[in-house]
Image (spheres, rainbow, N blue to C red):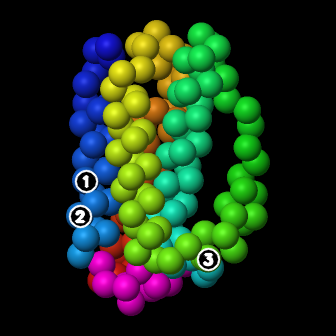
Amino acid sequence: MPQDRTLFERNHASTERIRTLAARLTDEQLLHPVGEHWTVAVALVHLAFWDQRALDVLDKSESEGKLSAPEIDIVVNDLSLPFWKAIPPRKAAQIAIETAEAFDKRLEGFPFPLLEEVRAARERWVERSLHRNEHLDEIEAVLK
């Protein structure tokens, strides 16, 4: 178990931010632009996708007993955009919440030495709040 439990608290707090934001958003707000190509819904599905990626790293690493994280080129965001846009906005918010919750739960039971190895390789695979809060800040800024 990690010595620094604040990691879990920060991840849980960012999951709660997703839940709270999604609960108050109207369908119209879910379609509000965030940047040039994204909407709020796309940003939420983006978070779910990368939380799922981090879950995959944890699962493969634990299964193999060592860090296992095949590289994914950042262009995956651009390649995934048409698929993300096809997801109904309310479903996008639901997927973001469910995936964040699944990640938070999985991380809490993850073996500590392996957790530290995964974290050393890429902090964002463990500290999902960094990525989540970055996009949640963007969403909240454009909705003001």
The disc labelled 1 sits on which kind of residue? Answer: Glu
Verify CB contact (< 8 Å) between mark 1 and mark 3. no
Q: Which residue is mark 1?
A: 16
- Whole-Å distance between the Cαs marked 1 and 3? 25 Å
The mark nearer the N terminus, 3 or 2, is 2
Please give the name of the residue rendered at 50% of the width and 46% of the height, measured from the top-left corner: 51
The disc labelled 2 sits on which kind of residue? Answer: Thr
Q: Nearer the viewer, residue 6 or 83?
A: 83
Image height of 57 relative to 73, above or below: above
Q: Which residue is mark 2?
A: 20
Magenta highlight range:
25-35
Verify CB contact (< 8 Å) between mark 3 and mark 2. no
Q: Is residue 17 magenta?
A: no
- Residue 110 seen: yes
- Residue 34 seen: no
The mark nearer the N terminus, 1 or 3, is 1
Q: Which residue is mark 3?
A: 86
- 41 lies left or right of 15: right
**Whole-percent x, y for residue 70 in the image:** 73, 32
Q: Is residue 33 magenta?
A: yes
Q: Nearer the viewer, mark 1 or mark 3?
A: 3
**Whole-percent x, y for residue 79 in the image:** 75, 64
Image height of 36 relative to 57, above or below: below
- Say which element carries label 3: helix
**Whole-percent x, y for residue 125 in the image:** 52, 35
Verify CB contact (< 8 Å) between mark 2 and mark 1. yes
